[in-house]
Image (spheres, rainbow, N blue to C red):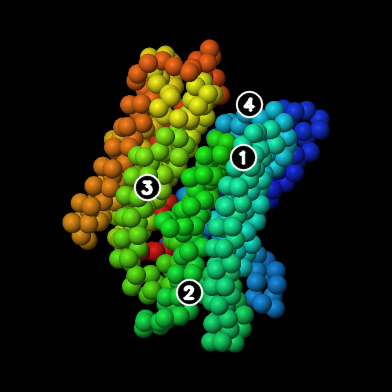
Amino acid sequence: MLLLLLIIIPFLGGFISWKSEQYNIKYPRWIALITMSIVFSLLMYFYFYKFINFVHRTSDHRWIIEFSYPWIPKFGISFHLAMDGLSLLMIFLSSILGIISVLCSWNFYQHYKGLFYLSLLHIFSATMGIFLSVDLFLFFCFWEIILIPIYLLIIFPSVKNNAKRRRISSANSFFMYSQFSSFIMLVVIINLSTLYYIKYNFWTFDYELLINLFNENKNFSILEHVLMIGMLIGFAVKIPIVPFHGWFPNVHRYLPVVGSIDIIGFLSKTGIYGILKFVIPLFPNSSHNLANFFVFLGLLNIFYGALLAFSQSDLKKVIAYGSISHTGLIFSSIYAYNQISYEGAIIYLVSCSFSTSALFIITSLLKKYFHTKNIYKISGLLENFSWLPGFFLFFCFSSIGLPGTGSFIGELMILMGIFEKNPTLSGIFFLGLMCSVVYTLRFMQNICYGNYKNVSECTTISSIDILTLFIISFFLFFIGLNSKFIINILCLTKPII
């Protein structure tokens, strides 16, 4: 029942927040914050009273906790939710970023607040469904549902914005990419269920049954390879992986900061989660056979993202291409098939979500004070602001692996794991990380130093922005100094690599 509450509470909270706008313009944001806090409190309760007990149990159960209710029995479809270590970690990350999203939008919108928080809470609710579904049909439903509130969130500011046409064009591009990949994924899921029906003479979409379909046969199968690539494309669009990244930079360019955090913190992580939870376990033989190709594809992402980030003048596009480079490192590490690099990739994934979200928040503040996102028109930050330069430098250094932060531990474990398998390859990865250092130092130099220009009279950041950036800093240090917390949770997932 707890798993169901994690989906229902933000779903209902969204409607209450929407309707409360009629009574007071401030109610929607408070209801959104209370809703997110309730979900986070439930997770903390679960962690301390269920998770720890589960750790001490000598059990072969795949799931820490699960909930199942028949939905369409004729086709073996059920409302089957379950949580393992990986999904628990992703939900923790999403709930923290959900609270940060509400705080970021505290004073951002003056109009249609109810509709805005309705979209935000429904994105969160659908994300919970994606991380908890272990029936493939149910998973696909949540995968599709999340597109609608994200689409609304992208076009939402256009109500009062001159860049309406470009914003809607970006939203349409995102929707077309998503629909294309979702259609391929649906075909793969139906094929999997049909294969199971042919073999065992009954329909099912249950993950625990379908996982044995190709695990029992270790021979080379063209069908397994085709289905695996189809499902991988569905997730690669959301991560995003080159060449399915076309929607990503433009959407971030026109999105408000809250939307950027949602895409970085929620949507992109669902893609990585999908590969770990579905692609590799459901198609173990083909995933292993094509692992070297995927490592190469991830490397291409690292260098491509870094080079494009270096050539951009729009600050949000620099961060977006930098994010593509980071996800390339995570993607390659997963397919390196090494336990150390796998754990390092998850730690790096969580840390990058925090540091990239923080950089998007600071970008919105720079836009507010300098009236531009062009890095060549922003300068003198270091000498003229009290809190902002310190946070900006910290999150920039964190994104490139500042010792003491989670990114440093993640990069170190990734390089150690890959070195154990292929020392030459680890050298190429190190070179890719150096490229990210170059573009980061470049835009740090442009923004922090130089003459003071184009700045508004207001140069003091609000207490709510300081609080938000402090929360993110705390979690970056927490992960860096206590990485065992993440590794212990991951131990509760059945071995993926």
Res 107 label: 4
Nearest the eye: 140 or 342: 140
Q: How many marks?
A: 4
Q: What is the distance, in whole Å, between disc 4 and disc 3 at their CAs?
A: 33 Å
Which callout, 4 or 1, points at the residue further toward the start of the chain? Answer: 1
Res 305 label: 3
Res 36 label: 1
Tell me if mark 4 has few (under 14), some (14-19) or many (20+) residues whose alpha carbon lies within 10 angstroms of its own: few
**Do we see residue 482 in this rendering?**
no
As helix, strand or loop, the secondary structure at mark 2 comes to helix
Left or right: residue 11 compared with residue 375: right
Question: The disc labelled 4 sits on which kind of residue?
Answer: Asn
Front tag of 3 and 1: 3
Which callout, 4 or 2, points at the residue further toward the start of the chain? Answer: 4
Q: Is residue 288 above or below residue 162?
A: below
As helix, strand or loop, the secondary structure at mark 4 comes to loop
Q: Is residue 227 above or below residue 356?
A: below
Tell me if mark 2 has few (under 14), some (14-19) or many (20+) residues whose alpha carbon lies within 10 angstroms of its own: many
Question: The disc labelled 2 sits on which kind of residue?
Answer: Leu
Q: Which residue sits furthest right?
A: 22
Left or right: residue 98 compared with residue 399: right
Q: Position of residue 379 (x, y in %)?
A: 40, 21
Q: Position of residue 114 (x, y in %)?
A: 73, 37
Which callout, 3 or 2, points at the residue further toward the start of the chain? Answer: 2
As helix, strand or loop, the secondary structure at mark 1 comes to helix
Q: Residue at 57% across / 39% down in the picture? A: 255
Q: Are marks 3 and 1 in contact (CB under 8 Å)?
A: no
